[in-house]
Image (spheres, grey):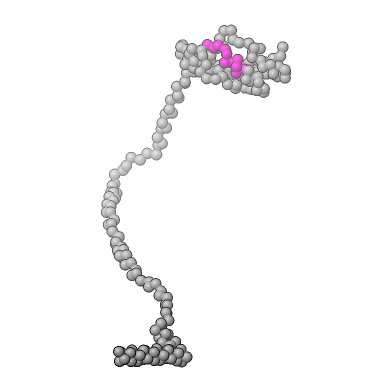
Amino acid sequence: MAAYAYQSSSNRTTVLVAIIAAHVLMGWALVSGLARSVVESIAAPLITDLIDDIQVDEPPPPPPPPVMERPPVEVPPPVVSIDIPVQTTTTAISDVTDKPRPPAPPPPPPAPVAKPTPAKLGRNFPNSEDYYPSASKRAEEQGSPTVQVCVGANGRLTRDPVVTASSGFPRLDEGAVKLAKSGRYEAGTLNGAKAAESCIQFKVRFEIK
């Protein structure tokens, strides 16, 4: 029992001495900077480098194939043969006359174109007083415009009447056209028959009475 107690106390003394020695060693390391060099050697500083993107140079495309120029096709010129008449000399006397040729007869005159006889005013032709514009009367406008009328074989108008000679007053000319539209006519004749179209010109007199 005594031996066990002595051995246990000696072990404790050894451990205590080891602990004290370790603390003394650590304190000396801190003072001398040995610990710092050890830490720096263990934990090395991190070094970061920027790595540029590696650019891969692509090879250029192959050049296009050369264009071969075709030689021009030479077309031979056509062969044209011209027959030149050979003038033969003769001793025969040719009949040569200096008399001028007679002129050609003139062409016959064109046949006259048959014209229909003028149309005629029908019965109960309207009076110009009925178509005298009241505004022209108040303005004392007077005149005698000339109107042309064309009718067919039935005596009806084939076109609108027109004023061929003005009176100098537009209102009187318009009144004359209205009178011509309302009148009745007889067709002219052509070769004894009623013409397909015949015309007549007449004056419409507007006077203040």
Residue 103: x and y, percent? 42, 32
Work out whether residue 117 or residue 31 is closer to the camera in this orientation and state it: 31
**Residue lying at 48% horizontally and 12% vertically, measured from the top left:** 154
**Residue lying at 65% horizontally and 19% vertically, measured from the top left:** 172
Q: Which residues are magenta?
A: 176-186
Q: Is residue 63 above or below residue 6?
A: above
Horizontal side of residue 205 vs 151, given as left or right? right
Residue 100 appears in the rendering: yes
- Helix, strand or loop for the magenta stretch, by majority: helix
Residue 47: x and y, percent? 42, 79
Residue 177 forms part of the magenta stretch: yes
Residue 129: x and y, percent? 66, 12
Residue 146: x and y, percent? 61, 19
Q: Is residue 13 above or below residue 188?
A: below
Horizontal side of residue 205 vs 93, given as left or right? right
Residue projecting furthest to the top: 124
Horizontal side of residue 141 vs 95, given as left or right? right
Q: Is residue 100 above or below residue 154?
A: below
Work out whether residue 40 or residue 33 is closer to the camera in this orientation and state it: 33
**Residue lying at 30% horizontally and 65% vertically, measured from the top left:** 65
Residue 57 is drawn in which quadrant? Answer: bottom left
Quadrant into which the C terminus falls: top right
Quadrant into which the N terminus falls: bottom left
Residue 189 appears in the rendering: no
